Image (cartoon, rainbow, N blue to C red):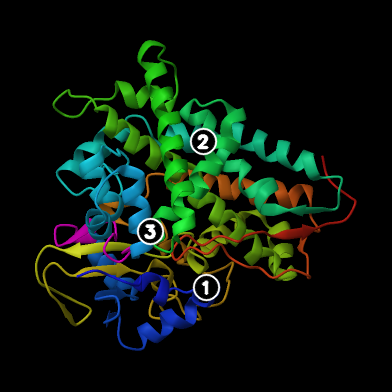
Amino acid sequence: MTTTTNPVSEFFNQDVIEDPYPTYEKLRSQGPVAYVDSLDAYMVTGHAECMTAMRNHDVFRQWDGSELNAINPDVAEELAEMFGVDAETAQKGGLRGIASTSGFGLMVDTLVTANPPEHTRYRHVTNQAWSAKRTAVDAEPRIREVTNFLVDDFAGSGKVEFMSSFAAPMPSLVISEILGLPKEDWTKFKEWSDVGLTLLGGNLERDQVRAAVTAMMNLTAYLGAAIETRRSESTDDALSALLRAKDRDGVGLEQQELLSIALHLLGAGHETTINAMGNMMWLILRDAEVRDAILADRSLIPNAVNESLRLEAPVQFLFRQTSEASTLGGTEVPGDAKVCLIFAAANRDPAVFPDPDRFDLHRENSRHHVSFGFGIHRCIGEPLSIKELELAVDTLLTRLPDLQLHPDQSFDHNPHPFLRRFKELQLTYGSSVAS
């Protein structure tokens, strides 16, 4: 049946995007697993239930949420026109339908949406190129260098728009070096990523389609060229390591697999960290006592990072689909059911986190948040993201100890249903800046 409206855009409208937590609590009031008829999906708000689903990956299978992100007819017509397919194919399958008929090679399931045994193979190969040592240990000097370089650029002005001047370039510059991409190219792939990722949100209008698809194609072509260069000029970077890596049978990755994983690593390496960076600084700076406590005791920084990830998950939810009937949180979930794991709600489950809406620097179990997922699909970029967030707080508060939120701003978020990011974040500080 043709879908004429997008249920995601109805359920996650802009008012909900700005403050989704009352909506999550309404769902929680129906139980830790609530069926939403308009979405034909089971929404999981309980921490224990999210953990159960993530542990039980044989039943709760990875899924990209494409049916929830059903496109409207105007968008389908635009996609059909772009790729020379019929509108029905575009309507039913969106980009996945197009990928199967037009060679639009962006939709190979690898790290994020693949399931075992394919996922096991991809994770084994990727771990050879993307280790915690490469991304969080060896990269630490470069992360410190980048954070100080960025602060140097605005330190004398007394004010800064944090998202564009620090939150976006910091992880983008770091991931450029880890992947072996020219650091001067970060603005290009950052723009392509920002525009292209709107394809995941399900809220596109017809006049946004071409820009989004073109951005993803440009990003894919850019990474494809970088991979091809390394076939003849291998270097000591993550892309070269990925190209050399083999699975347990001694087989390397094909080009489309390489591209898919490279796109995932790029996202894991900068996209969610940008979101988390803005969320974290907003939480720390909205209360001067929190900022001053961190200044007085830097050992609180790891907990501040985890508490910010708990309270403001940079990825609010992701999707699963059941392979068979199961019971979750006392709810009977049938086979082939659509399931949405709401990480942001699980992180505020009062059964696990007392006084869950409070930012608590001394919360003993902050690290038990599920913002990076759990189990075999836990985010591969977690060690790098944590290190970047910790060093960012340390550098910013060391050099700008009176950093504060500018009071005259709206704190609006990007119109994306599950990637939570401030459009901008205006900060001010005094003239005394440490070098």
Front disc: 1 or 2: 1
Q: Which of 108 and 381 is in front in this view?
A: 108
Circle 3 SS class: helix
Q: Mark 1 points at which residue?
A: 14
Amino acid at pointer 3: Val
Q: Position of residue 62 (x, y in %)?
A: 23, 56
Farthest residue in the right direction?
A: 431
- Within 10 Å of the Cα at label 3, are there few (<14), some (14-19), or many (20+) other Cα atoms? many
Circle 2 SS class: helix
Task: Tell me the quarter of the picture where residue 231 sits.
Answer: top left
- Within 10 Å of the Cα at label 1, are there few (<14), some (14-19), or many (20+) other Cα atoms? some
Residue at (56% x, 51% y) in the render = 274
- Within 10 Å of the Cα at label 2, are there few (<14), some (14-19), or many (20+) other Cα atoms? many
Is any part of residue 132 visible from this angle? no
The region drawn magenta spans 55-71
Q: Name the residue under label 3.
A: 75
Residue at (39% x, 67% y) in the render = 343
Find out whether residue 59 is within the magenta segment: yes
Q: How far apart are marks 1 and 3 (CA)?
A: 20 Å
Q: Nearer the viewer, residue 49 or 150?
A: 150
Could you tell me what secondary structure mostly forms the magenta stretch? loop
Q: Do the residues bearing badges 1 and 3 touch, measured as CB atoms within 8 Å?
A: no
Amino acid at pointer 1: Gln
Horizontal side of residue 26 vs 99, given as left or right:
right
Residue at (30% x, 68% y) in the render = 340
Q: Where is residue 1 in the image (x, y as percent from the top left)?
A: 19, 70
Residue at (45% x, 48% y) in the render = 210
In this rendering, is residue 254 above or below 408? above
Q: How far apart are marks 2 and 3 (CA)?
A: 33 Å
Q: Mark 2 points at which residue?
A: 175
Front disc: 1 or 3: 3
Q: Do the residues bearing badges 1 and 2 touch, measured as CB atoms within 8 Å?
A: no
